[in-house]
Amino acid sequence: MSSAWTPSSWREKPAGQQPEWPDAGALDRALKTLASYPPLVFAGEARNLMAALGRVADGKAFLLQAGDCAESFDHFSANAIRDKLKVILQMAAVLTYSSGVPLVKVGRIAGQYGKPRSAPTETIGDLVLPSFRGHIVNDIAPTLDARQPDPDRLITAYHQSAATLNLVRAFTMGGFADLSRVHAWNQEFVASSAQGQRYEVIADEIERAMRFMQACGIDLQTEVQLHQVDFYTSHEALILGYEEALTRQDTITGDWYDCSAHMVWIGERTRELDGAHIEFHRGIKNPIGCKVGPSITPNELVDLCETLNPERIAGRLTLIARMGAGAVEEKLRPLLAAVRESGHPVVWACDPMHGNTFTSSTGHKTREFDDVLAEIHGFFAAHRAEGTWPGGVHIELTGDDVTECLGGSEKILDADLAERYETMCDPRLNGRQGVDLAFQLAELLRA
Ligand code: PEP
Ligand code: CO
C-alpha cells in the first residue's frame, strides 16, 4: 500500500465488479472524452463537506445520506428530482429539531448509476444473461443486446449527473428549501397521515420554535440560513474508469479530487484491502465512505481506517454499518470499541437497508419498515453502550409513491407490492415512509 498513488494506480490491483466492456477502443474513447469534460463538483465544496463531516465525527452534527438505490436513465425528470429532494429536506428538518445539532445533508443522487451484483450472470427462462450493473453500464431489459455493456453510457451518466446537480443546486439555493415551506409540508404530512396525531406534538413544537425565532426578530423569509441549504452529492464509486476520468488535480492545493461527486463510497463487496477500490479511494482527497457488513473483524476495520485515513483527518472517513436488525448490536459493539481504541476519528452512519432485504411471498425483493427502524434502534443502543456518537443514517428512498418496502404508517402489505414496484435494484422507502421514519427517529432521539 505504500507505493506511489496516481489516479490510475488502481489498475495494478484486482478490481471487482467491473463490466467486461466488449470494445476496448470504444471504452478508451469514452474515457478520453470524459477526461476532457469539466468537473461536476469543485474541490472546495468537497472540503466544505469534509469540514461538516468532521463536526459529525466530533459528535456535534448528524449526517442524513439518502436517495435511490440506483438512479435511472429512463425515470429522469424535474418532478422526480424535486420530490426526492423534498423528502430529504422534510426528514432533515425533523431531525435537526430533534437532534438539536446541524444536519449534514448528502444525496445518493447525481451519479448513483453503478450497481455491484452477487453474480456476473443471471438466468431468465432459458437465457443466461450478463447481470444488470446499473444504467452507467447496461440496460435492465432481459435481452442479450440490452445487457451488453456500452461505454456511451459513461457519457450519458456524466450528462445526467450534470443536469441533476444543476437542478439540485437551483432548488437548494433558489427558495425551494425554505424552512417555512419544508415545515408546511411536514404539517401536511402529519395532518394526512394515519398515525399523524402521534407526530403532532413534534410538529407543533417546531412550529413554536419558528414563531419564537420570528418573535426574536429573525425574518424567516429572508434569513439565508433558513432559506438555503448546503446539499451535497454522493454515490458508490464502483466503475473505476469513470471515476478516474473525473479525478482532477486541484489548482489551489495540488491535491487530487474525484470531481464526480462531493463524497464517494466503497461498497461492501469491493472493500478488500489490497483491491483496486481501496487503492483508488486512498489517494483522492474527497470525504469518502466505506460500507461495513457483519463479516468484517475489528482488526480488519482498523487496518481499513489506517489505509484510507492515515493522517487521521476527522470527516475524511465515514463508516456505513449495514449489519441487519438482528445482528447490529452484537456485531457493531466490538467494531465501535476497536475504532475508538485506535483513536481514528470516523463518522459512524447506520445503513438500515442492506442488511434487511428479503424476498416476499409475491417474489419481490423487499424490506420491512419495522426492521429498518429496529436496526437504527440497535445502532443507537450500541453507540450508547460504547460511549460513541451515532453520527447518522444512510437511507434508500424515493419521493415517488412506490410500494417497495412493507409496513410504515400506510401498512403496505405483501399483496400491495406489485402495485407500484418500480425500483431497478433494491426496494426504497416511498416519500411518506421516509418522513414517517424521520419522525420515529425523532422520538428515538428525544428518548
Ligand atoms: C448500495 O448501497 O446500494 C449497496 C449495494 O450497498 P452494499 O455495498 O452495502 O451492499
Ligand atoms: Co441498494
Image (cartoon, rainbow, N blue to C red):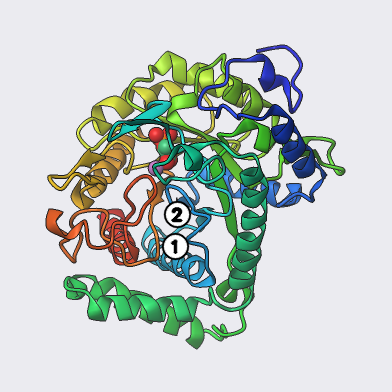
Picture residue at 49% right of the left edge, 43% below the top: 146
Front residue of 172/276: it is 276
Q: Count the marks: how many?
A: 2
Whether residue 390 is visible, yes or no, is: no
Ligand 2: give its quadrant. top left
Residue closer to the observer: 357 or 120: 120
Q: Amino acid at mark 1?
A: Ile
Estimate the x, y position of residue 240 in percent, counting from the top left: 63, 31
Callout 2–callout 1 Cβ contact below 8 Å = yes
Q: Residue at x 45, y 69 (%)?
A: 83
Q: Which residue is mark 1?
A: 88
- For marks 2 and 1, give the CA distance: 8 Å
Rendered image quadrant of residue 345? top right
In the picture provided, is 294 more to the left or to the right than 262?
Answer: left
Q: Which comes before the other along the chain, label 2 or label 1?
A: 2
Q: Residues within 10 Å of mark 1 (few under 14, many from 20)?
A: many
Q: Which residue is mark 2?
A: 67
400 left or right of 311? left
